Image (tube, rainbow, N blue to C red):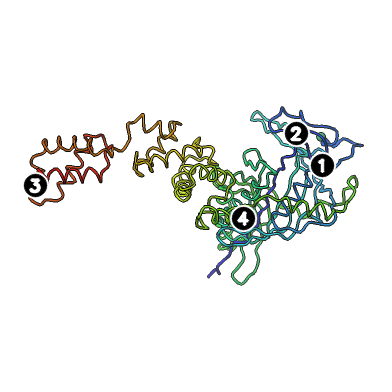
Amino acid sequence: MASARIPVIGLEVHLQMKTASKIFCGCSTQFGAPPNSQVCPVCLGLPGVLPVLNHQVFLYGVRVSLALGCRIQSQIVFHRKNYFYPDLPKGYQISQYNLPLGTAGAVDLPSGKKVRIMRAHLEEDAGKLLHRPEGGSLVDLNRAGVPLLEIVTEPDLESPEQAYEYLKTLKGILESLDVSDCDMEKGSLRCDANISLKTDEGKLGTRSEIKNLNSFRSVARAIAYEIKRQGELLDEGGKVVQETRLWDDAKGVTQGMRSKEFAHDYRYFPEPDLVPFAVAEKEIEQARAALPELPRQRAERFVRQYSLSLPDAVGLTSSRSTADYYEASVKKRPAASKVLANWILGDLAREINERNADRIEALNFGPERLVELVELIDSGKISGKMAKEVLIESLNSKQSPKAVVDAKGLSQVTDKEAIKVAAREVIQEQPKAVADFKQGKQTTLMFLVGQLMRKMKGAASPALSQEVLKELIEKG
Ligand SMILES: [Zn+2]
């Protein structure tokens, strides 16, 4: 019988930092410019040019490393990573090798899991190949030399769910640091996954590396697929090959690409054009003091300031946009701090999911609209149940909750006199039901309430309708 196997997963995240210019030259990093319009002799790798490190890139790298609890290297050294690929004009990538900028950090996940960060290092991006359907490929080198920070975990993750949770938590931290737009669609946040299976006796397996993962969901799906594939292969007596595999999101499978080159194949050697430099302790301490409030700290403040439970506060602060949304709404209605949190974590989170929106802004339902909705309930104008429908209608029509309520004549009638008028009509129209009720058949009251609601187009407060009907029948 095959012994149980435990997945061993490590993730590499490439973060594009949002500096105005590239890492080693003055070219713009603006996204979406015409192909090859943002290039110069340095990023084209022409002979005789010298790269110069963009100081802002270094500072951003330090900021991220510190936020991840990393130690900062005392000497900054760059290496050449040599390989041939058509999108790499120099024939090598300038990266960091044995002395990465940050080492030995950790990220605490909401579930309590701690994920160790092995390293965070600076490097330049390569260009982009455009494969034409009619054949042939074109190269766009606008992205060559765009600054990246590669963040590598220890192989501490054990499931697709944990990998997903780590990425969400990491993204929340990165967003709070304001060093990147963290947009996966634009490629400013990219992820590769390393997966192997170890036996329960601790014997490590061979790993495969999965690339081409362009959403957190595809990372989780690809990992689940790879765990299954490797497990089945081993069950059949096969061997896992060390290789790079590409994730095909449409087919839901990984496919082998090329055998993994070993590190020495890259023939790393120190970049002779960039002189190593010592990091000033003072600069690190300044960067540490200037760190913004991180998601975990923000969650703890939410608990103190808005009397929320810690899980709710962690949920709200897992993304910067959700946390900002919450704070903007609670500012307008401090008394509703818990109610607002419930709406955001409940109905709004569900709608974000169902509408495949990646963040709360995409709903076009600003904090002022949520506050308006809560005020409509608090004033008794609509019931909590009606509010859920108003929310959906408001999201669909992009109208404010108030406009939806007015347009649909949805308001809950709590005016006792208006209900009395309708109730008298119902009593007159339904003599048999009224008689049944008088003889003790309690269930007919609900029938009468139903008739009354129909007459008032569902707008009457059900509790009040019942009370008024009972009162009138018992009196008459
Ligand atoms: Zn350039």
Q: Mark 1, residues whose alpha carbon is within 10 Å: few (<14), some, or many (≥20)?
A: some
Q: How many numbered circles are shown? A: 4
**Discs 3/1, front:** 3
Viewer-proximal residue, 368 or 276? Answer: 368
- The image quadrant of residue 19 is top right
Between discs 4 and 1, the one toward the N terminus: 1
Q: Nearer the viewer, mark 2 or mark 1?
A: 1
The verdict on label 3 being within 8 Å of ligand 1 is no
Instruction: Determine whether label 2 and label 1 are within 8 Å by CB.
Output: no
Which mark lies nearer to you, 3 or 2? Answer: 3
Instruction: Check the image and name the residue furthest to the right.
Output: 48
Which class describes the residues within 10 Å of circle 2: few (<14), some (14-19), or many (20+)? many
CA–CA distance in space, label 3 to label 1: 86 Å
Disc 2/disc 4 C-alpha distance (Å)? 38 Å
Q: Which residue is mark 4?
A: 297
The x, y position of residue 214, in whole percent, is: 61, 43
- Residue 243 position, x and y percent, is 68, 53
In this view, 237 is above or below 386: below
Secondary structure beneath dot 2 equals loop
Q: Nearer the viewer, residue 255 or 418?
A: 418
Direction from residue 282 to residue 202 in the image, left or right: left
Write down the residue under mark 3.
436
Q: Which residue is mark 1?
A: 54
Query: Residue under circle 2?
Result: 142
Q: Establish if 37 lies above or below 378.
A: above
- Residue 227 locus on image (x, y percent): 57, 57
Q: In the image, is residue 405 above or below residue 297?
A: above
Please give the name of the residue rendered at 86% of the width and 52% of the height, measured from the top-left corner.
269
Q: Of the residues shown, which amino acid type is indicated by label 4?
A: Gln
Tell which circle, 4 or 3, labels the residue nearer the N-terminal end. 4
Amino acid on which the number 1 mark rests in the picture: Asn
Q: Quadrant of ligand 1?
A: top right
